[in-house]
């Protein structure tokens, strides 16, 4: 049986980041890139304090386009998500297509 991953979302420095460092398999945040880098460094420090390897915490963020995805990828994000909603009963999958095309250039 595989381990069920724990995803924690947020960026609060007093409660959320320590919880991420101690328990999360995946950390999701909407932080701007510079704040994301700072918070990610803090998670790494806290994880070490809890005896965890920072590499065991996957970074996740919201997809806004290829340029920002490149920045977040360079900062350590490996999981990107987006929301696709129906408009008048139809789904516009162009964002998913852009995400897939971007992902496929990174292989």
Image (cartoon, rainbow, N blue to C red):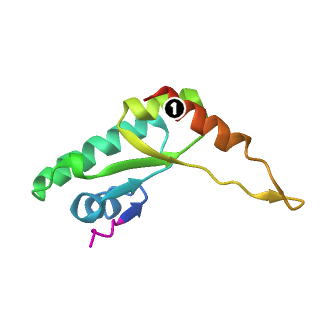
Front one among 68 and 106: 106
Confirm whether the magenta stretch covers residue 98.
no
Q: Is residue 29 left or right of residue 67?
A: left
Q: Position of residue 60 (x, y in %)?
A: 43, 49
> Which residue, as the protein is rendered here, is positioned at the far right?
88
Q: Secondary structure at mark 1?
A: helix
Q: Which residues are magenta?
A: 1-6
Q: Position of residue 52 (x, y in %)?
A: 14, 55
Please tell me whether the stretch drawn in magenta is mainly helix, strand or loop: loop
Q: Looking at the figure, which quarter contains the N terminus?
A: bottom left
Q: Tell me which residue sits at (42%, 33%) in the image.
A: 73
Q: Tell me which residue sits at (13%, 50%) in the image.
A: 48
**Which residue in the structure is indicated by mark 1?**
104
Front one among 38 and 69: 69
Please, is residue 84 above or below residue 105 in the view? below
Q: Is residue 52 left or right of residue 12?
A: left
Q: Position of residue 16 (x, y in %)?
A: 34, 62
Q: Tell me which residue sits at (41%, 39%) in the image.
A: 35
Which image quadrant is residue 100 in? top right
Q: Tell me which residue sits at (28%, 52%) in the image.
A: 57
Please, is residue 36 above or below residue 18 in the view? above
Which image quadrant is residue 20 in? bottom left
Which image quadrant is residue 87 in? bottom right
Q: Position of residue 96 (x, y in %)?
A: 65, 44
Please, is residue 13 above or below residue 101 in the view? below
Q: Is residue 30 left or right of residue 25?
A: right
Q: Looking at the figure, which quarter contains the C terminus?
A: top left
> Which residue, as the protein is rendered here, is positioned at the far bottom?
1
Mark 1 closeness class: few <14, some 14–19, many ≥20 residues within 10 Å: few
């Amino acid at each position: 049986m595989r381990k069920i991953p724990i995803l924690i979302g947020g960026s609060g420095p007093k409660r959320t980041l320590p919880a991420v460092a101690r328990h999360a398999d995946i950390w999701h945040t909407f932080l701007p890139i510079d704040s994301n880098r700072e918070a990610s460094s803090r998670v790494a420090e806290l994880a070490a304090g809890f005896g965890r390897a920072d590499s065991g915490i996957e970074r996740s963020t919201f997809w806004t386009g290829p340029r920002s995805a490149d920045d977040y990828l360079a900062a350590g994000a490996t999981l990107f998500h987006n929301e696709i909603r129906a408009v008048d009963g139809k789904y516009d999958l162009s964002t998913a297509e852009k995400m897939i095309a971007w992902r496929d250039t990174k292989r």
